[in-house]
Structures are given as structure tokens and as C-alpha cells.
Amino acid sequence: MEKASKNSPFAEILAAWPEARLREVMARAGLEDVRRALGREQLFPEDLAALLSPEAVPRLEEMAHLAQRHTRRHFGRTIGLYVPIYLSNICNADCLYCGYALGAGRPGARRTLTQEEIRAECDILARHGFQSVLLLTGDAPKAAPVKYLAEAVALAREYFPSVSVEVYALKEEDYRKLVALGLEGVTLYMETYHRETYAQVHPRGRKRDFAYRLGASERAGQAGVRRLSLGALLGLYDWRLEGFWTALHARYLQKECWQSAISVSFPRLLSVPPRFTIRYPLTDKELVQLMLALRIFLPEVGFNLSTRERAGLRDRLIPLGVTMMSAGSSTRPGGYSNCDEETLEQFEIEDRRTPAEVVEAIRRAGYDPVWKDFDRAFFEAPT
Ligand code: SF4
């Protein structure tokens, strides 16, 4: 039998908002609740529920104006750029929705990049102008142990001032080792905050441990990681509930890890392996409502948008609260420096524009693309 992990204090906050209570609050929300939420300085969770409810749909335009104002006040007219580097596509987990999963049945070579190959990827991306990278692996502590991650972080720091990882959930002491080598950010999606769905889509392996994953971002913050990105994989369960729970988590981390900048991502399941059906797809309009509601509830939290989404939609979402975008991404190991090899990719990229084309689109929208690490001065200010 698998050993259950100790609960994060956030688990109690989550438990105070079970599905039945949340559905009831959303069902009771009326236009007056939405109006009140839009007029408040500091929103309560009930206000967020109203903004995520169907009742808020007729007020989307007003929400968009408010969201834009909040974003401009806290982030100006800038969009930070980052790029993912897939270090390994070996994974021992079997998440039903993922192309890297053991049982996904997708063809393609599986491998872990050597130091030399990581250097080749860094070299190309640094020449494109990127200064912020996200290093990714599957859930494979044997193929990509902490020692390997540490070497990869140290190597990437030779090229980029800002290095983040999106890897399996680690112990606090392991996050600490990576921070000592220059790690700045950790991206870790809960996938779904709905326990039953979590258990269904993670049928076996270490990742089944809901509590351990739920506490990972907090462990990273306590270890000194200065950027924490979280999110739910949209499409696994009802987006209104996932959005609410994600926002509560972000607010909790803002308080508990106050020295870290918190951001939320909106990964939407679009391409999945044949064995999986997306049971809770969300439309573009619903994605917009979700982002607006979260921006109004969390005015100081960054929003990341990856190339999973189509180019046209990404461009339209820029003014609604986005603060970081990936560009020119590949989701296969060696995807930048070794284009001939058909290694397995995690998911299909929708926005296939080059970094220069994305930069141009950001400028056309009236924003400044930012390559440099604009938070560094803040993080390194003397205390
Ligand atoms: S989501 Fe992550 S852990 Fe799960 S199968 Fe895919 S790469 Fe592995």
C-alpha cells in the first residue's frame, strides 16, 4: 500500500471549500453578487465564485476592462518571454492524459539529454535572445535524478539569468540544493484539485500522492525558490471549480511564501493520447472568463500563457492579464539543436511562430516584449 504524505496547511483551506459547497455558492450567485465583486478592492472567495459563475457571463466586457486596469497597474505594458527546454522524455508515471506516459502508446524515441546536448540547446536559445528558460523532465528520478537536475540548472545558468524547472515534486532539501546552484523558479501544476479525478487520471506510481504534490510549491518557496508557478490542467474537471481552487492556492502561497513571486498558468488540454477523452473541455470564451475572474481576484499574480494555445487566441488574450509567454517552443528533448531526430514530444504545439514573430505580435498589441529578467532588481534588493 502506498504511504500517504503529510498534508500541507493549504489542504485544510481546500477542504473548507468542497465541491458541494462551491457549487451551491455558484448556483446562488446573482447579478448583484457579480456587481458587488466588481466593486470591491479586496475580494472574498465568495466574490471569486460569483465571477466564475454563469451569472457573470453578461458582464465579461466590464470584467475585461477591470482586468486590464489591474494588469497595467501592477505589470505595466510588458510581456516577459521564456522558452522551455525538454531535458528528458522518459517518464515512469502513467498520467492518462499525457503523451509521455508509459501507457500512452505513442511512437518516438525516449531519451535524456547529455550535458553536451543541454549546452547545445542553451547555446541556440541564448542566441535567439532568451534570458529566461524552463527546464522540463518527466517523472523519472532514475533517468533524471536530482544530481542531474542540479547539473542542468548550473549549466543553464551559464547562459540565462533566469532558470526555472518543471519536474517531479521534490523534497524541500532538494529544492534547496537547486536554489544554491541558481534555480529561480519552479512550475508545478496540481493537474486537478479534485481528489477523485486526481486518483482516476493518475492510476499508479508516485504521482498518485495528492498531498505530496499539493505541498510541493510551498516546499519550493520555503527552500528559497523565488518564482512559483501553479495551475490546473484545464479539461480534466470542471474549469469553474478548478479555477476557484487554483486561485485559493495562489492566494495562500502569496501569504505563506511572501518572498516569492506567484504566477498562474492556464494549460488547456487540446491534444491527448487516443486512450483519453477530454470530458470537461472549455471553450475560448470560458477560458477568457476564467482568466478575467482570476486577474480580478489576484491583481498582483503573474499569468503565463504557453504555445499550447493557437497564435490568434494568444494574441487576443495578451491585454486580458497575460504577463509571460513562451515562444518558439519545442516539446521534445533536443528539439532546438537536433531537428532531424524524431524524439517523442509531450504535446503538440499550436502556436508555431518563431520567437521573432511572437515578439512582433506582442508589439502589435501595444506591449513591450521583455527578454531580460525584470524581477531581478526586486529579488536582489538589499534587505
Ligand atoms: S504529465 Fe508529467 S508525470 Fe505525467 S506522464 Fe506526463 S510527463 Fe509524466
Image (cartoon, rainbow, N blue to C red):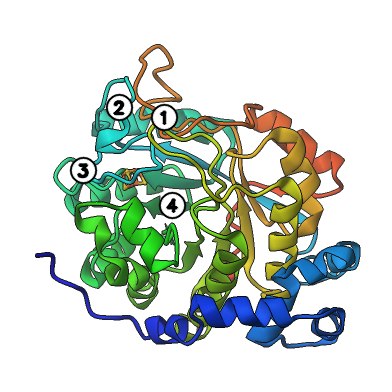
Q: Which residue is drawn at 81% across and 84% down?
A: 33
Q: Name the residue under label 2.
A: 105
- How far apart are the alpha carbons under marks 4 and 2? 32 Å
Mark 1 or mark 2, whichever is nearer to me: 1
Q: Mark 3 points at which residue?
A: 92
- How far apart are the alpha carbons under marks 3 and 2? 14 Å
- Asked whether the residues under the numbered discs 1 and 2 touch, taking CB atoms below 8 Å apart as contact, a structural biologist would say yes
Q: Residue at x 60, y 38 (%)?
A: 307
Asked whether 290 or 215 is in front, the reply is: 290
- Asked whether the residues under the numbered discs 4 and 1 touch, taking CB atoms below 8 Å apart as contact, a structural biologist would say no
- How far apart are the alpha carbons under marks 4 and 3? 25 Å
Q: Does the residue labelled 3 lie within 8 Å of ligand 1?
A: yes
Q: In the image, is 369 to the left or to the right of 88?
A: right
- Asked whether the residues under the numbered discs 4 and 2 touch, taking CB atoms below 8 Å apart as contact, a structural biologist would say no
- Residue 274 circle label: 1
Mark 3 or mark 1, whichever is nearer to me: 1
Q: Residue at x 60, y 47 (%)?
A: 281
Who comes first in sequence, dot 4 or dot 2? 2
Q: Quadrant of the N terminus?
A: bottom left
Amino acid of disc 2: Gly
Asked whether 203 or 91 is in front, the reply is: 203
Q: Residue at x 23, y 64 (%)?
A: 174
Image coordinates of residue 164 in percent, x first then y, are: 43, 54
- Residue 97 circle label: none
- Residue 163 circle label: 4
Who comes first in sequence, dot 4 or dot 1? 4
- How far apart are the alpha carbons under marks 1 and 2? 8 Å
Near mark 1 (Cα within 10 A), the count class, few <14, some 14-19 or many ≥20, is: few
- How far apart are the alpha carbons under marks 4 and 1? 34 Å
